[in-house]
Image: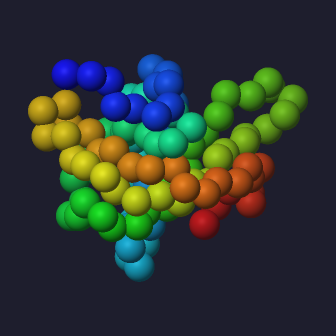
């Protein structure tokens, strides 16, 4: 089977927080499994999230000790649930960098 991905994936283990699923606020902390410019695969939140549903999530980025917390606030759509590896795949349609207290939602 030919590779169909549009963007190169990077195997990155970063803290991620799912904060919104559709119109519902949720709070699920997990970890990314891989990240690309077009999407993310992260640990399955065990929330009832349907394929096609919009989500909002925050990825915590590694920083130097004098910089403080930097997070990437992302909006996307769930494209699949992978029961075999217990993961959720979502697009990365919009994002913004947020720092410290501004990262809270």
Q: Quadrant of the N terminus?
A: top left
On screen, residue 85 above or below 18: above
Q: Quadrant of the C terminus?
A: bottom right
Q: Residue at x 72, y 42 (%)?
A: 70
Q: Quadrant of residue 101?
A: bottom right
Which residue lies most toward the front here? 2
Q: Quadrant of residue 2?
A: top left
Image coords of residue 9 (percent x, y): 47, 25
Which residue lies most toward the left here? 84
Q: Residue at x 80, y 26 (%)?
A: 65
The reply, left or right, for residue 55 in relation to residue 82 is: right
Image coords of residue 36 (percent x, y): 51, 33
Image coords of residue 6 (percent x, y): 46, 34
Q: Would residue 54 be seen by someone viewing this image from the given angle?
A: yes
Camera-side residue of 45 and 80: 80
Camera-side residue of 53 and 103: 53
The reply, left or right, for residue 73 in relation to residue 54 is: right
The reply, left or right, for residue 51 in relation to residue 100 is: left
Q: Residue at x 43, y 29 (%)?
A: 34
Image coords of residue 50 (percent x, y): 23, 64
Which residue lies most toward the right here? 66
Q: Residue at x 39, y 49 (%)?
A: 90
Camera-side residue of 97 and 65: 97
Colour style of the rendered protein structure? rainbow
Number of disc labels:
0
Q: Would residue 31 be seen by someone viewing this image from the given angle?
A: no
């Amino acid at each position: 089977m030919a590779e169909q991905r549009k963007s190169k994936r990077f195997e990155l283990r970063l803290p991620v927080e799912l904060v919104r699923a559709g119109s519902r606020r949720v709070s699920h902390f997990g970890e990314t499994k891989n990240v690309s410019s077009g999407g993310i695969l992260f640990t399955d939140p065990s929330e009832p999230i349907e394929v096609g549903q919009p989500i909002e999530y925050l990825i915590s980025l590694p920083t130097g000790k004098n910089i403080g917390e930097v997070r990437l606030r992302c909006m996307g759509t769930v494209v699949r649930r992978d029961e075999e590896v217990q993961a959720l795949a979502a697009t990365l349609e919009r994002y913004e960098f947020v720092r410290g207290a501004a990262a809270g939602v």
